[in-house]
Amino acid sequence: MASCAQLPVDAPMVPGLIGSVDCRVHDVAESGFAALAGPGSPVGLLLTGLLTLYVVFVGYRLILGRGGLRVGDAALSMLKIGLIVALATNWGLFQTLVYDTLTKAPTELGGILLDGQAPFARLQDAFDGLQQSATLMASRASVGAAATQGGPGFGAFAVNTGGMTLVLSTLGVLLASKVVLAILLALAPLVVGLALFEATRGLVEGWLRAMIALAMTPLVATLTLSLELAMLAPSLRALAEARAAQQFAPFDINPAVTVLVLTSVFALVMLLAMIALCVVAAGLRLPRGLAGAAWSDRNAASEAPRYATSQVEPMSRAATIAAAAVAMDRRDPAAPSSDPVSTRMLSVVSDRASTTTSAAPAGPAAPLGQTYRRTPAPRRAASSARRDQ
């Protein structure tokens, strides 16, 4: 951290803070990365152990043929191991691919959207003008007058509060996001190694989501500041004219109130924009499985027929017997349907089913000539009839 120059006391606040924080956060990320990725560091030993376990698990799946892992998937897994090792141990590669992308790309994108304008350069002029106007209004206020009584005292309070809110809601958010992003980037050697296993994949996803949201915060702060300065331009111009007239200008509190209201509104806008960034970053999902998205798609494709076939219920025993009987009748249409042997065989087989109930088999046919015979009445003795009376 000794490479960063000390900020002069009389240096402009906004560019001085931005330059100092950029240098400090770079040193924090680089030194933290080197401390964690060093050969003798505990994190380096942990990363080596995680890589060893991962290779053992992949080899175990290949040998036993479990999980549907194939040789092509193993090649992709080895490629992922090489990428993780390179990012977790080489600061030059990590700085080029990750650090510069997250810290410089949003700023360049903001410059493209604003057509090369630098709103933070104009922020210093706006803040200086607001402080001078607050000093002038405070000098015109009566001695001992409270700010809530109105007049120049309230104008000085409104302008001073508006200027501080303007700086904190734009420059403060920008610097805070850079500091937190540098801390997360310094933890990269530890977090990248956790991406090897499904159990710790959620930690890596949360780490990436936080870094994406923090990296996009300077872009949102730059765009918000540009719009805010454009809306504050008439009030800043009126306050500048009042400063030029000094004590001879009539006091007008409207520009001061406008500055206070607009800066408060845009502070709320910045808060809502950060919430929106968090919601957008929360949609990040890493591919599941050892071989990434292709692995997950193949597993989903292999599981689809199993669930599709399980939804079709098998035919019951009664339905199978009925289908067999219909097929038998179609094959032998000339056979009599009242054959006692056939009826008896079908009845016995259908009685074995537990879910169906069948009617009792019909009895043997009556002998010839006995169909309309009268049923004999039971005989009763005369003594029995007298006894019953």
Image (tube, grey):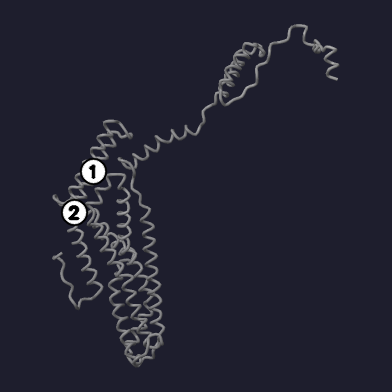
Q: Earlier in the sequence, mark 1 or mark 2?
A: 2
Residue at which label 2 appears: 36
Where's the N terminus, which quadrant?
bottom left
> Dot 1: few (<14), some (14–19), or many (≥20) neighbours within 10 Å?
some
Quadrant position of residue 366: top right
Rendered view: 21 above or below 294:
below
> For this view, does 232 lie left or right of residue 121?
right
Residue at which label 1 appears: 81
Task: Report the amino acid beneath label 2.
Answer: Leu
Q: Nearer the viewer, residue 277 or 204?
A: 204
Where's the C terminus, which quadrant?
top right
Q: Secondary structure at mark 2?
A: helix
Q: Secondary structure at mark 1?
A: helix
Q: CA distance from mark 1 to mark 2?
A: 18 Å
Q: Nearer the viewer, residue 150 or 107?
A: 150
> Dot 2: few (<14), some (14–19), or many (≥20) neighbours within 10 Å?
many
Q: Nearer the viewer, residue 200 or 257?
A: 200
| Residue 136 coordinates in the image, percent (x, y) | 32, 87
| Residue 360 coordinates in the image, percent (x, y) | 65, 19
Rendered view: 234 above or below 172:
below
| Residue 19 coordinates in the image, percent (x, y) | 22, 68
| Residue 40 coordinates in the image, percent (x, y) | 13, 50
Which mark lies nearer to you, 1 or 2? 2
Task: Report the amino acid beneath label 1.
Answer: Ile
